[in-house]
Amino acid sequence: MTDSQKEPALTPEQVLEDLEEERRRLHHLEKRLHTEAYDKVHKINRELTQQRYITRNREKEIARLEAAKPWASMPLLILMTTFAFGLGLLVGQRL
């Protein structure tokens, strides 16, 4: 390389200015990445919370239905027993 092809020497002020510009660029990049990461984490947390509420509500509904089963079938059981008893009396009288 000849002297005319070499880059001109930078003054200390230019080097400092380049470093400050690079620092600002990196700081801006860091802030943007931090914001993106925060948004992603917040979105995931929100989805997990929704899933927890959905799961909790489903568990409550299942527990409620399971607790109601014996009582829900009781009127039907009484009706069927009464019908069978009445039918038995009717058939018994005919014999």
Image (cartoon, rainbow, N blue to C red):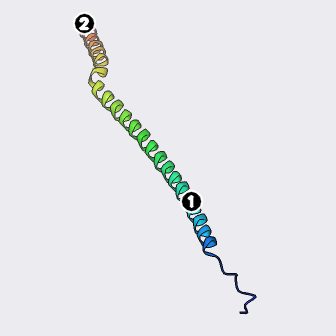
- Give the crowd class for mark 2: few <14, some 14-19, many >=20 residues within 10 Å: few
Local secondary structure at mark 2: helix
Quarter holding the C terminus? top left
Residue that numbered label 1 is attached to:
29
Q: Position of residue 52 (x, y in %)?
A: 38, 40
**Residue at left offset 33%, top offset 31%:** 60
- Give the crowd class for mark 1: few <14, some 14-19, many >=20 residues within 10 Å: few
In the drawing, does residue 95 fall left or right of residue 62? left
Outermost residue on the right side: it is 4
Nearer to the camera, 51 or 63 = 51
**Residue at left offset 60%, top offset 74%:** 12
Nearer to the camera, 19 or 29 = 19
**Residue at left offset 70%, top offset 81%:** 8
Q: Is residue 95 above or below residue 28?
A: above
Q: Is residue 69 above or below residue 25?
A: above
> Which numbered marker is on residue 93?
2
Outermost residue on the bottom side: it is 1
Cα separation, mark 1 vs mark 2, equals: 95 Å
Do the CB atoms of the residues marked 1 and 2 lie less than 8 Å apart? no
In the drawing, does residue 63 fall left or right of residue 45? left
Count the marks: 2
Which one is earlier in the sequence, the residue at label 1 or at label 2?
1
Q: Position of residue 6 (x, y in %)?
A: 70, 86
> Of the residues shown, which amino acid type is indicated by label 2?
Gln
Q: Position of residue 31 (x, y in %)?
A: 53, 55
Q: Position of residue 44 (x, y in %)?
A: 46, 47
> Of the residues shown, which amino acid type is indicated by label 1?
Leu
Quarter holding the N terminus? bottom right
> Which numbered marker is on residue 65?
none
Nearer to the camera, 8 or 82 = 8
Q: Is residue 9 above or below residue 86?
A: below
Local secondary structure at mark 1: helix
